[in-house]
């Protein structure tokens, strides 16, 4: 009887060890699944936050450009108290000053911002990024009574991904066209010389 009991006890021990191994294996798999799920969730959160941050940067820069350029246009065209057709000269320093002020008001920290206007209706907007100067360049034209900015791209492919040149172009276009539309004006032509733009503005269609 004693010998039989010992055999039974040994068998139970073997079964217990086997069951314990199965339980440990299941626990390990559960832990791995939980850790994997947690890591995946963290990755998704990081991607979403990064996407939201990049979108916020793009929108912020576009809006700052729009407000800054729009303010300069309003100050020039509306200098006499009412927006009127005519020929208006806008200096690059005036554009730079308003964009800097708008970026500061919006809480954006951009180092050594520059705005340069070149012959051939070429506009250049640049700043320092991690100690290196980067620029956006595009060409201005008057199309169907509005300002259009073509070919706006950054000198850095990384920057062009973070803030595409199209967003910069849209900010400039909206700043000019928004003011003209609000005051029933159209852009007949745009030309440039070193450091300055000349806008020829006409009255919009009043037939309707």
Image (cartoon, rainbow, N blue to C red):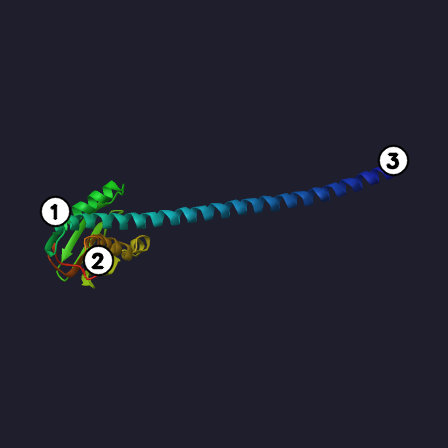
Residue 132 visible to the viewer: no
Give the crowd class for mark 2: few <14, some 14-19, many >=20 residues within 10 Å: many
The mark that comes first in sequence, 1 or 2, is: 1
CA–CA distance in space, label 1 to label 3:
114 Å
Q: Quadrant of the N terminus?
A: top right
Residue at the extreme front: 208
**Picture quarter containing residue 24?**
top right
Q: Is residue 120 left or right of residue 15?
A: left
Relative image position of residue 57 (x, y in whole percent): 31, 48
Q: Mark 3 = which residue?
A: 2
Q: Secondary structure at mark 2?
A: strand
Residue closer to the observer: 45 or 72: 72
**Picture quarter containing residue 168?**
bottom left
Residue closer to the observer: 103 or 14: 103
Q: Mark 2 = which residue?
A: 137
Give the crowd class for mark 3: few <14, some 14-19, many >=20 residues within 10 Å: few
Residue at the extreme top: 2
Q: Is residue 63 left or right of residue 194?
A: right
Q: Mark 1 = which residue?
A: 81
Relative image position of residue 38 (x, y in whole percent): 52, 44
Residue closer to the observer: 200 or 170: 200
Instruction: Give the residue at x 38% y 48%.
Output: 52
Q: Secondary structure at mark 3?
A: helix
The mark that comes first in sequence, 3 or 2, is: 3
Q: Secondary structure at mark 1?
A: loop
């Amino acid at each position: 009887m004693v010998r039989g009991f010992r055999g039974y006890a040994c068998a139970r021990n073997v079964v217990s060890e086997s069951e314990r191994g199965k339980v440990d294996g299941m626990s390990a798999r559960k832990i791995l699944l939980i850790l994997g799920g947690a890591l995946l969730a963290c990755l998704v959160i990081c991607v979403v936050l990064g996407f939201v941050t990049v979108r916020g940067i793009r929108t912020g820069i576009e809006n700052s450009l729009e407000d800054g350029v729009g303010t300069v246009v309003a100050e020039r065209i509306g200098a006499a108290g009412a927006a009127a057709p005519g020929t208006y000269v806008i200096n690059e320093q005036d554009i730079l000053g308003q964009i800097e002020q708008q970026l500061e008001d919006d809480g954006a920290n951009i180092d050594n911002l520059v705005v340069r206007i070149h012959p051939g209706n070429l506009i250049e907007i640049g700043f320092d990024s991690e100690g290196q100067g980067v620029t956006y360049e595009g060409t201005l034209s008057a199309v169907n009574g509005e300002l259009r900015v073509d070919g706006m791209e950054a000198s850095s492919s990384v920057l062009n991904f973070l803030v595409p040149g199209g967003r910069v172009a849209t900010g400039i276009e909206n700043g000019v066209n928004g003011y003209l539309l609000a005051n029933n004006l159209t852009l007949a032509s745009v030309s440039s010389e070193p450091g300055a733009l000349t806008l020829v503005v006409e009255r919009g269609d009043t037939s309707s």
